[in-house]
Image (tube, rainbow, N blue to C red):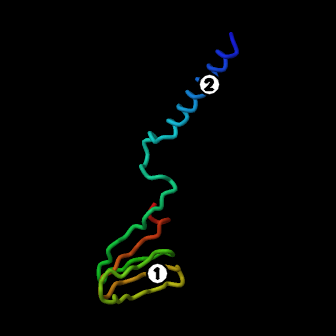
């Protein structure tokens, strides 16, 4: 076998391996279409007036009404639980990313 023929076989084999490896990394995993590094949006929950919501650290309450909203907040120091009740206006409770999974 000549050296030229040997080198051309190595090049062809290398190109084929690179192509197969490149295709292997392109989707086809059958899982989520999102990348694992993609930011996950917090889960937003519309708050009903008078309903009690238990909130966790990093949750956010976002006022959605043009006028100020009023809330009652309770903190039970024995269990470290916090409850929020929307009294007037409108708001959303945005659950932290760690709780939406």
Disc on the earlier residue, 1 or 2: 2
Rendered location of residue 77, percent (x, y) = 53, 84
Q: Quadrant of the N terminus?
A: top right
Depicted 71 relative to depicted 3: above or below: below
Q: Residue at x 40, y 82 (%)?
A: 84
Residue, disc 2: 11
Residue, disc 1: 82
Q: Residue at x 46, y 42 (%)?
A: 27
Question: Looking at the image, which is closer to me, 11 or 45?
Answer: 11
Specify the label residue 46 is tagged with. Answer: none
Element at label 1: strand
Rendered location of residue 79, percent (x, y) = 52, 79
Q: Residue at x 47, y 70 (%)?
A: 96
Depicted 22 relative to depicted 65: above or below: above
Question: Looking at the image, which is closer to me, 74 or 41?
Answer: 41
Q: Residue furthest top?
A: 1
Q: Residues within 10 Å of mark 1 (few under 14, many from 20)?
A: some
Left or right for 74, reference 7 = left
Depicted 26 relative to depicted 99: above or below: above
Quarter occupied by residue 15: top right
Element at label 2: helix
Alpha-carbon span between mark 1 and mark 2: 65 Å
Quarter occupied by residue 5: top right
Rendered location of residue 71, percent (x, y) = 37, 88
Rendered location of residue 43, percent (x, y) = 39, 67
Question: Looking at the image, which is closer to me, 43 or 99?
Answer: 43
Q: Residue furthest right?
A: 3
Q: Closer to us: mark 1 or mark 2?
A: 2
Q: Residue at x 47, y 66 (%)?
A: 97
């Amino acid at each position: 076998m000549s050296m030229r023929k040997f080198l051309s076989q190595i090049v062809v084999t290398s190109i084929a391996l690179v192509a197969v490896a490149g295709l292997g990394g392109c989707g086809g995993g059958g899982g989520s279409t999102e990348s694992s590094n993609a930011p996950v949006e917090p889960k937003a929950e519309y708050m009903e007036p008078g309903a009690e919501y238990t909130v966790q650290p990093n949750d956010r309450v976002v006022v959605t009404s043009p006028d100020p909203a009023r809330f009652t907040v309770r903190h039970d120091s024995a269990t470290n639980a916090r409850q929020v009740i929307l009294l007037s206006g409108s708001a959303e409770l945005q659950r932290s990313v760690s709780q939406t999974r």
